[in-house]
Amino acid sequence: MPSKVDPVEPPAAVFRPTDRLFFGVFPDAATAERTASHAQYLRQALGLTGHVVAADRLHLTWHHLGDFVGLPQVSIDAACEAASRTKGARFALTFDRIASLGHRAQRKRPVVLLPGVVPSALSDLWCALGQHLDAHTWPTRRVHGFTPHVTLLYDRQRVIAQPVEPLVWDITAFVLVRSLLGQTQHQHLGRWLLEN
C-alpha cells in the first residue's frame, strides 16, 4: 500500500514591481541635449564605459513615491492632490561637480552631476511637497534626505568628486512621472508650473 504523501504547496507567487512613481524636474529640450552632449564629453574625458542616459530621460528626482505591481489610481490621485497644493518660485540650478554615488559593493554606480550650491527655492519646494505628501499614507515612499543630482550614466569605475564646466537648468515646473521598470520608459502624468 503506498504511503500517504502530503500535497505539495505551490510556490508562493513572486511579485516583481512593474511601475515606479516619482516627482522630478526635467530640462527643456535644448538644455537636455546640452546635458547629454556634456555627459558624452565627460564620459570620454574620464575614461568611462557606461551608456549615457538618453536626453529625454535626464532628470532630477525630487520625491520617490515607491515601486508598485501595477500602479493604483488612488496613488496617482493622492500625488496629484499633493502637487496641486505645492507652490514655489522658478529658479536656476547650476551643476558644477561630477561624482559617483552609491555603495562600494554596487557593481555599477551612478555617475552624477551635482550643484555646488543648492538654491533655497529648491529646498523649500522639496520640503513643501513632502509635507503635502505626508498628509497621505505613503508606505512605499522613501525619505532619506535630499541630494539633488542628475544621473548621467552607470559605471564600474568610481569617479571622485571634482569640478566640471557649469551647466545651468532653468527650473520652471515639476512633473509626476510613471517609470515602466525594465523598459526605460517615462510617462508624465502631471505637470505643475512654478511661479515667476
Image (cartoon, grey):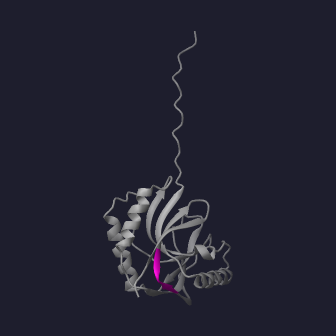
Marks counted in the figure total: 0
Q: Position of residue 117 (x, y in %)?
A: 43, 87
State whether residue 65 appears in this view: yes
Give the vertical position of 136 relative to 123 (above or below): above
Q: Is residue 98 left or right of residue 78?
A: right
Q: Is residue 38 left or right of residue 130?
A: right
Image: magenta residue range: 169-174
Give the vertical position of 180 relative to 149 (above or below): above
Give the vertical position of 66 relative to 113 (above or below): above
Q: Residue at x 37, y 67 (%)?
A: 81
Quadrant for the C terminus in the image: bottom left
Q: Is residue 86 left or right of residue 169?
A: left
Q: Position of residue 189 (x, y in %)?
A: 49, 67
Q: Position of residue 144 (x, y in %)?
A: 39, 68
The chief SS type of the magenta part is: strand
Please tell me whether residue 35 belongs to the stretch shown in magenta: no
